[in-house]
Amino acid sequence: MNKQEYMNRTYTLLRSFLQCSYADFCEKTDVVMEQIQAWTYLILVYPMVSGLERGILLVFDHEQVIADLAFMHGHLDDVLKKESVYDAITLDSDWSNLEYYTLCHYYFPDLDYPYCHSKKEENFSGEVVFFTNAYVTKSYRKQGIFFSMLDISKEMVCRQMETSCLLYAVFALDPDIPCYGPDTTNEPYYYSMKDEPTRILNKSILEKRGYIGIRLEDEEENDGSKLWYALLKGKRQINQCL
């Protein structure tokens, strides 16, 4: 398939989630297609509110989706200071709400929380990416697809930078529910301590890329929140423009 055919297939798959016309989808979305080994990676980003965009990456084996990843991205200054960005992130899901809290609590503990309500005017530099979903179909795991998705997403996040940028990344470590291929399930996900081994495994995988695993609270004080997150802060060199 060519790029337009992948765009058509992606819109059909995500239409109910995107809630926009195909014309708007094509007009407002930045799209990059990349071939790595036998698989086609299609990443798209589109605006949510001023200062915040959502990214979705799908991996195809011919016509079959075999992996996905989703994120929200903004400049750190907008993420911390714009109330509309704060609302968009924290109201999107319980996971993203706690991702935002974890970023601020861990990297900016001396700031008021949320900083956008303080009406202060410090300036902040860097890019922030909140990874909200990532799944690779079981039969395709252990083939490097997840790390390729991670790298492509970071390149897209930093696409407007010329040489380097300070990048903050936050990853939710709860297991994702597959919605395509032979792994498909229609069961909603509910937080459960039985999934703790999966969270620990997800943490160890991201630690191979320099992330730090964070538990928000002690197990004995657990109120059912999603406890495990992974954080990264580092300088990212820009090797090429997507």
Image (tube, rainbow, N blue to C red):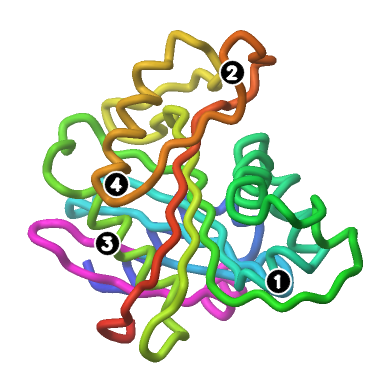
Q: Position of residue 225 (x, y in %)?
A: 64, 23
Tag 4: residue type? Val
Give the vertical position of 147 relative to 164 (above or below).
above
Residue ID for mark 3: 41
Residue ID for mark 2: 218
Comparing 21 with 61, the one in front is 61
Look at the numbered discs 4 and 1 and tell me whether their residues touch, using CB distance below 8 Å: no
Q: CA distance from mark 1 to mark 3?
A: 29 Å
Local packing at callout 2 (Cα closer than 10 Å; few below 14, some 14-19, many 20+) is few
Query: Which residue corresponds to the image point at 68% horizontal and 42% vertical from the top-left?
Result: 97
Comparing marks 4 and 2, which lies closer to the viewer? 2
Mark 2 element type? loop
Q: Earlier in the sequence, mark 1 or mark 2?
A: 1
Query: Which residue corresponds to the image point at 42% horizontal and 22% vertical from the top-left?
Result: 185
Comparing 44 with 165, the one in front is 165
Local packing at callout 4 (Cα closer than 10 Å; few below 14, some 14-19, many 20+) is many
Q: Position of residue 98 (x, y in %)?
A: 65, 39
Give the vertical position of 8 relative to 70 (above or below).
below
Q: CA distance from mark 4 to mark 2?
A: 38 Å
| Residue 49 location, quadrant | bottom right
Tag 2: residue type? Asp
